[in-house]
Amino acid sequence: MKENDMSKLCSDQDLAALVEDIRGDDSGDLDKIDRELRLFPEDPRLHFLRGSTLAGKQRAIEAHQALQKAVELAPDYTLARYQLGFFELTSGEADRALSTWGPLLQLPIGNYLRRFVEGLTHLIRDEFGPAIEQFEAGMALNGDNPPMNHDIGLLLAECRKALGGGAPQNGDDGESATSFLLGQLSPGTTHH
Amino acid sequence: MIAKPERVEAALWRNALGNVAAVRGRIFSHYARFARGIARDRFLARRSDNHEIGDVEQLAYEGLLQAIDRFEPLRTIPFRAFARPRILGSISNGLGKYSEAIANAGYRRRTERERLKSLIPASSGEADSALQQLSRLTATLAIGLILEEWRQGEVEQVGTNEPNAYDTLAWKQTELLLRGAIDDLPATEAFIVRQHYLNGVSFRQIAAALDLSTGRVSQLHGRALGRLHGRLEKAG
């Protein structure tokens, strides 16, 4: 985010406090986020937080709108872009997801989000072998977001199953990436 | 592997925000089976009333179309919960209004008339003799019967191990060819064929779903069956 935009953003401390507050007690969580958004309507992190909270409440239409707003405000906010695309993919909108993810394919090859997107792109085409390769590479590179590795791990297990390569790991349920968004959101993550 | 049904459904409504007319057809397709299920339950419950299943389904689809137009996606009530009482209401009101005379000219007869009307212009090639025209019309009507058979198969689901005419290799190949040919039709024509034959939706209701006139739907139906006939002819 540029220097002169900083006043439009909620401070890192306030954002961290808001995330902690919501994590500890989710009653009135949307009200709390909306209160901050009234003060900082152009803070993409707040829209991202709102989107993830709405997704957790199964309010999918508004969740998508909020995630989209976050990406519109900060096109280089890679985590939000990744999650928006993932949300679209889980909504049966594969073409839209690919379009949303497009810019992530310009990231360096050592970026785990790029690897995950490449893996998901293979998965869309039922190319399980290459999807597994990309997922594994991405998980090895990802030191920032352990919850995301958990999600990708579930997909990895499904890919292996599809290839006839054994039982899924952990016997976990198919919890979606968006359910972990709260855990991923930390101040200053717009990567500008 | 990845798509979640509740999100897929939400995406349908998200795309309808502000312009439901643009995606009404897709939404209708998504819920047509749901409406038909309600119609069948009602039909079985009121079998003694002597109505045709086709009539009950048409009323269910009418209720579905009304529900689609009145639904507010951003309210947290799920669409099916919103639509069910409206569909049931449409069936109850509609059946209550049917006179004996209307029942006599039931869904099936009306549908057959509509189809025939739609196919006659499509089948009248310029240089063809009357016999050739009749032959083409018959073949096109037969395609409709094949398509309808898929739906009947779904309705009846009778468990018999005896092979019948529909189990022959030639028949299965024709079916396969037809399914592929429908996939290749222009989107609106494919929608009309699928909804009319596979879901039993009348031209009038398809017209409402697509924001077209009934005459236009009839015309497109004729064109679609003409194309399917052409594909079957080519395949020999």
Image: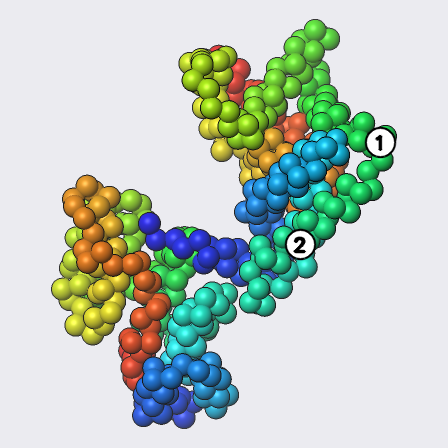
What colour scheme was applied to this rendering of the protein? rainbow
Distance between the alpha carbons at the discs numbered 2 and 1? 26 Å
Q: Which mark is residue B85?
A: 2
Percent of width and height locating residue B177:
46, 23
A65 to B111, vertically: above or below: below
The amino acid sitting under disc 2 is: Pro
Q: Residue at x 63, y 54 (%)?
A: B83
Front in this rendered view, residue B176 or A183: A183
Mark 2–mark 1 CB contact (< 8 Å): no
**Residue A41 in sight in this render:** no
Percent of width and height locating residue A95:
41, 53
Q: Secondary structure at mark 1?
A: helix
Judging from the image, mark 1 belongs to the subunit labelled: B
Q: Which mark is residue B100?
A: 1
Percent of width and height locating residue A133:
16, 53
Q: Residue furthest left?
A: A140
**Residue B168 in sight in this render:** yes
Front in this rendered view, residue B106 or A67: B106
Judging from the image, mark 2 belongs to the subunit labelled: B
Question: Which of the 4 quarters of the picture holds residue A81?
Answer: bottom left
B2 to A30, vertically: above or below: above
